[in-house]
Image (tube, rainbow, N blue to C red):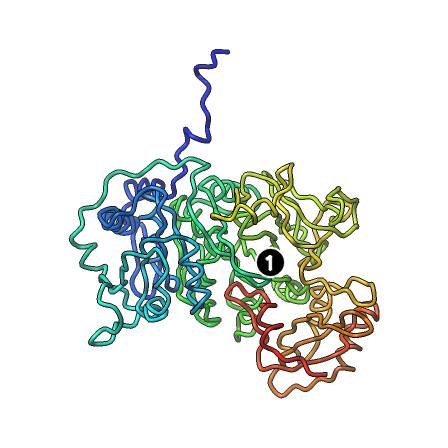
Amino acid sequence: MNNRHLVNLGTAVDVNPAAAVHRNALHEPDAVVVRYSGGDVTYAQLDERAARLAVVLAEGGVAKGDRVAYLGLNSPSFLITMLASFRIGAIFVPVNFRLAGPELRGILRGSGATTVVCEEGHRAALDAVRDGTALKRFLLVDDDPEVPAAPAPAAGPADWEPWARLLADATPMGEIVRRAFDDPAIVMFTSGTTGLPKGVVLTHGNIWWNSINVDSRLDTRRGDVTHAAAPIFHIGALNSFLLRTLVRGGTVVLRRAFDPQGFLDDLVRYRVNSFFAVPAMLVALARVPGVFAAGLSHVRSIVVAGAPVPPSLIRQYAEHGIWLQQAWGLTETAPFATHLPVEHTLDKLGSAGIAMPFTEVRIVDTETNLPVGPGVRGEVVVRGPNVTPGYWHNPEATRTAFDEDGWFHSGDIGYLDEDGYLFIVDRLKDMIISGGENVYPAEVEQALADMPGLADVAVVGVPHEEWGETVVAIVSLAEGAEVTLDEIRDHAAAKLARYKLPRRLKVVPAVPRNAAGKLDKVTIRGTIEIGS
């Protein structure tokens, strides 16, 4: 064989999503790519606006490898900023719009972003923390009918530039920088539920390989309609279906936030084929009157992840012919490492599924790092082309997360059954050691998930003089409900050993969760005073 004809696909293939959107705009310019309350967007419009913003960014000094941040809710502006960044080879930094103060400053400073695009409702929060960051340019979204207009006169520093005029005056950039598998695309900061957020580097290859995994396992098709109501600054909502839909020429029904009735209306009106959701969204949807009589047979792929899925919720939907497909992963795996095939929804109830086709998953002993057998609990480790190369400017965190064989250590505790199906037990850092026994809070939370009267539940450990730690249940209640510690313990005792049962109970108005729907254990431990 003549080696001169061999190519390195990692560098020869252009996997830039901006290039794919441009191709779609050339061939189907009038096809609607985004359904949005503020106005629908065609492929030609999305491509042109991204090309205009790319010029605005470049003229402002943004070059290949620089970071561009976005602060705002789900909107076409988010997608335009991301695609414009990709066009010039810059790295996109989506920012959690719920952050403020030190957390927001930490992400902006840690990313080293030099330009930010921001919605009016978040400008004041950003102005309050901009000092000490690398930000030099501030672009304000001023042409979205869904975004409240700025007060008159506008408050804050005067260096904000309304972007509508800038885009109108810019000549669209014709060139799109080629991006290979190893080129960084996104720096996405983790939610920080167990510590300070870290910037996860996701390459164009990570994004691409996750899409191939999804296409290989789920029923996705060209021209599909997907729905995005979960926050797309998280990788689950962004890279489960949305980015792939843009690449393949489909349509995204994009909503700024989740509203159960509006969500159902969208599913029916637009004949949605796929969506990503966290369990809390599906719990709320199930409460909408008439939801299971609405006719949702066109919804082929529902991925639910981000938090443990109560088996009762899966059964409830399955009884009506709607199959929830569990998946497991992290920001670092872009996001899916495993998926439960729809045909095994009920016979593997509670499982997060099997490894994705181009991803390896195994369980290792937390002390020896050696693989363990079926049914034995240990840390879940992952290896594959969808896994991040590491953390942004944080070599120590990267070294800690990867072993010498390239396995990424997830920090999740789980086991594989005899058939190779993964069951997640809990986070390693959340594990409670009480009287020398390991108690996994997620296991207790799942045992209580279907208890009548409970709206939500979290379980944490608190210091105990005799046992080292003791188990505490923190619950919010359904309207008019009352529960006692004895009732909590009696309900859980049907599924758990007695040493795992809560010994203390705290009732709160709402159990803290982050934007991804995960229990915010840092807030729960730090702000809720546990009484005896």
- Badge 1: few (under 14), some or many (20 or more) residues near its Cα, within 10 Å? many
Amino acid type for the residue under numbered disc 1: Leu
Q: Which residue is mark 1?
A: 324
Q: Position of residue 469 (x, y in %)?
A: 76, 70
* Residue 475, above or below 444: below
Q: Residue furthest front?
A: 132
The C terminus lies in quadrant: bottom right
Image quadrant of residue 64? top left
Q: Nearer the viewer, residue 290 or 480?
A: 480
Q: Position of residue 28 (x, y in %)?
A: 30, 44
* Residue 233, above or below 219: below
| Identity of the residue drawn at 25% across and 65% down | 142
Q: Residue furthest left?
A: 169
* Residue 136, above or below 59: below
Q: Residue furthest top?
A: 1
Q: Nearer the viewer, residue 413 or 392?
A: 392
Apparent side of residue 405 relative to residue 163 in the rendered image (left or right): right
Q: In terms of secondary structure, where does tag 1 sit?
A: strand
Q: Position of residue 144 (x, y in %)?
A: 28, 65
| Identity of the residue drawn at 47% across and 39% down | 205
Q: Nearer the viewer, residue 218 or 400?
A: 400
Label count reads 1
Apparent side of residue 436 relative to residue 350 in the rendered image (left or right): right
Regarding residue 281, the answer to whether it shows in the image is yes
Regarding residue 298, the answer to whether it shows in the image is no
Apparent side of residue 83 relative to residue 372 in the rendered image (left or right): left
Q: Position of residue 33 (x, y in %)?
A: 34, 52
